[in-house]
Amino acid sequence: MLDQASNNELPAIPAKRYFTIGEVSDLCGVKPHVLRYWEQEFASLNPVKRRGNRRYYQRHDVLMIRQIRSLLYDQGFTIGGARQRLEGTQGKAEASLSSQVVRQVRMELEEVLQLLKR
């Protein structure tokens, strides 16, 4: 079941500029209605909205959602506690996001290396 996957088991984020809510749902192991709810609870989560109010998430949004997911599901924070952690210690959140970016880039480079070896 994808909802129970830890951040280490989540799929690599493709090299795209924008992601639909369905793609983000798959990438983060969170259902679309949960993503919409989190947008209301976390001011820093603000995807671009285009025609028909369709949401388009960027890479930094996906990383933020993974961070929120980790705080709520893996570390046991409440919504309020996770919000306070993200807003109150922005430096820590940014450092965590940076480490996620590095981990993501490394995974993508390893995939490229495997393709080149074939």
Image (spheres, rainbow, N blue to C red):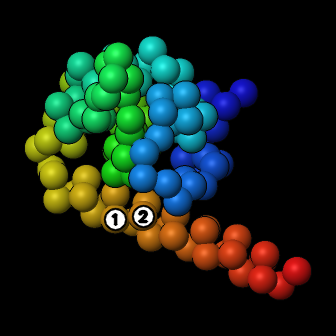
Q: Residue at x 45, y 15 (%)?
A: 33
Q: Position of residue 109 (x, y in %)?
A: 61, 76
Q: Position of residue 112 (x, y in %)?
A: 69, 75
Can you say which quadrant of the picture contains the C terminus? Answer: bottom right
Q: Nearer the viewer, residue 25 or 58?
A: 58
Residue 98: mark: 1
Left or right of 32: which side holds 44? left
Q: Tell me if I can see residue 58 in this picture.
A: yes
For the residues labelled 2 and 1, say whether their Cβ atoms are less than 8 Å apart: yes
Q: Label 2 amino acid?
A: Val
Q: Nearer the viewer, residue 40 or 9?
A: 40
Q: Label 1 amino acid?
A: Ser
Q: Nearer the viewer, residue 10 or 4?
A: 10
Residues packed near mark 2 inside 10 Å, few (<14), some (14 to 19) or many (20 plus): some
- Which residue is at the far bottom? 117
> Hey, which quadrant is residue 34 in on the image?
top left
Instruction: Classify 61 as above or below 69.
Output: below
Q: Residue at x 33, y 23 (%)?
A: 51
Label 2 sits on a secondary structure element that is helix
Left or right of 56: which side holds 32? right
Q: Position of residue 44 (x, y in %)?
A: 20, 38
- Which residue is at the far left? 88
Q: What residue did someone put label 2 on?
A: 101
